[in-house]
Amino acid sequence: MTVTAHGPLPATPYDVTVVGAGVVGSAVARELARHPELRVALVEAQDDVGQGTSKANTAILHTGFDAVPGSLEARLVREGARLLAAYAAESGIPVEPVGALLVAWDEEQHAALPGLLEKAERNHYRDARLVGPAELYAREPDLGPGALGALHVPGESIICPWTTTLAYATQAVRAGADLHLNCRVERASRQDGAHVLRTTRGTLRTRLLVNAAGLHADTLDRALGHDDFTVTPRRGQLLVFDKLARSLVRHILLPVPTALGKGVLVAPTVYGTVLLGPTAEDLDDKRDTGSTAEGLALLREKGGRVLPALLDEEVTAVYAGLRAATEQDDYRITAHPEEGYVTVGGIRSTGLTASLAIASYVTDLLPGLGPTRELEPVRMPNLGEAFPRPYQRPELIAADPEYGTLVCHCERVSRGEIRDALAATIPPAGLDGLRRRTRARAGRCQGFYCGAAVRALFEETRRASAVGEPFEEARP
Amino acid sequence: MTDVREVDVLVVGAGPAGLAAAARLAAAGVGRVEVLDRERQAGGVPRHCAHGGFGTWSRPLTGPAYARRLVAAAERAGAVVRTGVTALDWAGPLALHTVGPHGPETIAARAVVLATGARERPRTARLVPGTRPAGVYTTGELQQAVHLYGQRVGARAVVVGAEDVSYAAADTVRAAGARVVAMVTDLPRAQTAPARALDSRLRHGAVLLTGTTVADLLGHGRLSGVRVRHRDGRTAVLPCDTVVFTGDFVPDHELARRGGLTLDAGTRGPAVDGSLHTSRPGVYAVGSVLHAVESAATAAREGAHVARTVLDTLAGAERPAGVPLVVDPPLRWIAPNRVTPADGLPYVLRTTAFLSRAVAEVTQDGRPLHRERLGAAVPNRTLGLTARWTSRVDPGGGPVRVGLTGR
Ligand SMILES: Cc1cc2nc3c(=O)[nH]c(=O)nc-3n(C[C@H](O)[C@H](O)[C@H](O)COP(=O)(O)OP(=O)(O)OC[C@H]3O[C@@H](n4cnc5c(N)ncnc54)[C@H](O)[C@@H]3O)c2cc1C
Ligand SMILES: Cc1cc2nc3c(=O)[nH]c(=O)nc-3n(C[C@H](O)[C@H](O)[C@H](O)COP(=O)(O)OP(=O)(O)OC[C@H]3O[C@@H](n4cnc5c(N)ncnc54)[C@H](O)[C@@H]3O)c2cc1C
């Protein structure tokens, strides 16, 4: 079990290296770890897994009902949804099958619903149906006035994206894959039939290579001599409303899609908060994950129409994610068998859902991986409100009072959970990583009450482990 | 299922308000008075206000010293103060689910006093755009980081706000060895004593930018600056690695809301009358949860005041209905915000406008009840109104209105 964050990389060549520890790269590494004969590396430019697009999305486990029928994306989303739902149940990743309502607010939108129902069927999704205004308002009593009807898609679910990425990467590492953080691949070449990757932490050699670099997949692709596509970052800004707003919404409330994209949704999260977003803005800067006054004003305007009471609630987070859009409306997964190289590009707005299906599709494109085995299941800490959290489990507190000692009050995070996260297979590199693993500091006070205490716990552990190898697993 | 334990009075929150209430009740001989606090130490916000401004004129104290005295007084009187215990939700009209290191517990009481305090709105709730770097604080987090944990903050800070708490934040920044490069307020001038504003500017070199808002936070990883926008549209970037969002307080009303208690639209705390009854019989509210942040003395005064109400109720007194008490602009809110003719607790009010000689006018159904000179009105500072007029209120009439005039 190896996780490194600094120092030189191992000199022995790897069989397969995956570049990018987002949800996609981590899923691929996990799939590769099922092959006991392979030496697998997962390399990530940032200091933690899931720090790219995978941390900032709308966290929906899609059915694929509205995909482009016949596309690779449609197929992998459909398969991925099934695989991830099963994996989530096994690993303790919170999922809630709340269902979605595509709400029509004018005649034109209303007229588009039957076509969407038909499209869902072409995507092999047969549970969708049209509902009239009476049923719609019975299902969503706080919906703004004037809705004409909706398409009900009961299979759409909400999921925890952070736990998902972390579960894949944890399982891969526990099965023997090496995770190298702070390790940006800057140049790539081929020598004696192997890839030579120049990284910020030195040279890494590998027989096979998977490019899952998200927004930078095109750059890495070019470094390897391919010029197949260009990634345009399409920013989505989002607002998260306080837990006290959760009772206002029961389903994922989607607008009827237009030519410009899927539009702004209102959805519950598995953490018991409410999401409003995302916007869709094409940018040139792949680092521009900032929010803007115009973006936030637009969201409030749209959200106020869907759920007027939402605007009175406190906002607990504002964030933005960048979709990896390309010139084509589909995934750009390309194998170059003679080079032992696969590009996983253009995983735009459904990559979380499709991740496990993408992983299995990608490994099928790689030659000579050898026999497979079942992996030891992982059990992740639960961040979801629909399942008992540690503070709600008397037996756990009786065994260890630290689970009854709350540190972050708004999100009810115990000292025990923070301690566990800091000692986990892949420990957080900073307070943001700790937040994604525990929800500490994610609530309405944003640290007014708990910020300093959480930071103290983090720094204590950091100091204690600084004497040894900081990111090596201490316990078996 | 957890067993239900019974106490006489359960106080949620061991800040000045809750501790003062518990001390009075225990001293008056009420059987079991229990105060819960989710923090590891009792005392509430004053624990981390490592500066003077507490206590009395004759016995000025720092926040931590004041907090210790309140805890000691409550315990001496016989109240049980339990820390590390969180009240999670209601288990009945007068019962709460709690959790702590000893596990879950349900506590039922004959009376429940909510004293859950308030917090500052963080950057997110204020919808300040930009990146999400480290180095963004509220005063509460900053004070705890510096005074309770001795943590480092950055080297150059911008303080958002120019009211008393903003100047306290600036002092904490300096105590941590950092510099305040600017204070920023969207209002036309500081909302603190002129001497304090002058001192901060002249002696400590903290520029005060008025009519200015924070438009954008900059920097990846660590904050690198804030973009500010002046009312006339000009923008500028202030390089800094720390920004403190001060003021803009909101009550911690989670329990009040979960219990379905009626809230006041202005304060966002539970609606109470001058005896501090909430809309639910047997449940009372005191301190910052009613009016997000007044002086600790006001909170403690309300704690003492509610003890009398609780004692009367335990002795069988009826809760009077009262009528709503509402404000007209430029007032933002008033607390208490219901009124009965017997009420005697002074009122606190907040305004949005600067007025040099403010006069409050109280009316009911167009009938004048009272007129009072309040002195200078300054946004984010307390205005006080006496309760000398409440006996004139018609309990069967319409809402009582408070207006503010002046120049
Ligand atoms: C606003 C928004 C909403 C969305 N909503 C949903 C949704 O509801 N459901 C859903 O299924 N999907 C959704 N998505 C899509 C989903 O988030 C993405 O498809 C998915 O996260 C992509 O994962 P990834 O691993 O390809 O990319 P990333 O998470 O970006 O991972 C790529 C990683 O590669 C690393 N990297 C890049 N270059 C290098 C290099 N040279 N060397 C080393 N490492 C490198 C990066 O640091 C990064 O960590 C949404 C996306 C957005 C933006
Ligand atoms: C930064 C700052 C500086 C200040 N400076 C001054 C000053 O110089 N002078 C002055 O007079 N006043 C000052 N004040 C105001 C003063 O601190 C408050 O008026 C006073 O603390 C209010 O007392 P309280 O008891 O209502 O609330 P708090 O002191 O806020 O106490 C509330 C308590 O309730 C607990 N609690 C909340 N919910 C639960 C729950 N569900 N379960 C268990 N426990 C719970 C909290 O942990 C907290 O300890 C300042 C306030 C702030 C925020």
Image (tube, coloured by chain):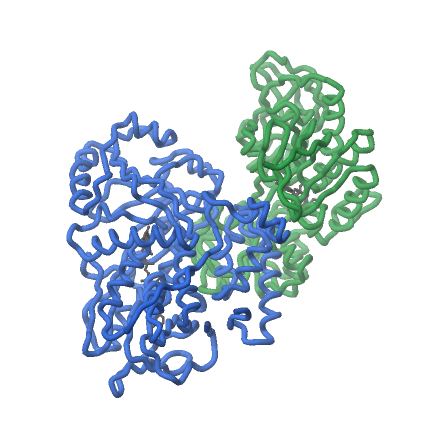
The residue lying at 67 percent from left, 27 percent from top is B276
Q: Along the line of sight, which residue is nearer the eye, B39 or B381?
A: B39
Left or right of residue B274: residue B76: right
Where residue B109 appears, as percent x and y from the top left, is 69, 30
As drawn, the chain in blue is A
Query: Ligand 2 shows up in which quadrant of the image?
Result: top right
Q: Where residue B164 sits in the image (x, y, percent)? A: 65, 47
| Viewer-closest of A295 and A120 | A120
- Left or right: where A109 falls relative to B74: left
Q: Answer with left or right where residue B369 lies relative to residue A472.
A: right
Residue nearest the viewer, comparing B74 with A364? A364
Between residues A267 and A144, which one lies in front from this camera angle? A267
- The answer to whether any part of residue B374 appears in the image is no
Q: Is residue A143 left or right of residue A258?
A: right
Is B2 drawn above or below residue A34 in the view shown?
A: above
Residue B185 % position (x, y): 54, 49
Q: Answer yes or no: is residue A22 visible.
A: yes
Q: In which quarter of the image is residue A109?
A: top left
Chain B in the picture: what colour? green
Exactly how many numbered labels are in the figure?
0
Residue B388, relative to residue A467: is it above or below? Answer: above
Name the residue at 20% across, 68% down: A334
Indicate whether A321 appears above or below B60. Answer: below
Residue at left offset 31%, top offset 68%: A372
Q: Where is residue B281 in the image (x, y as percent from the top left)?
A: 64, 23
Q: In which quarter of the image is residue A52?
A: bottom left
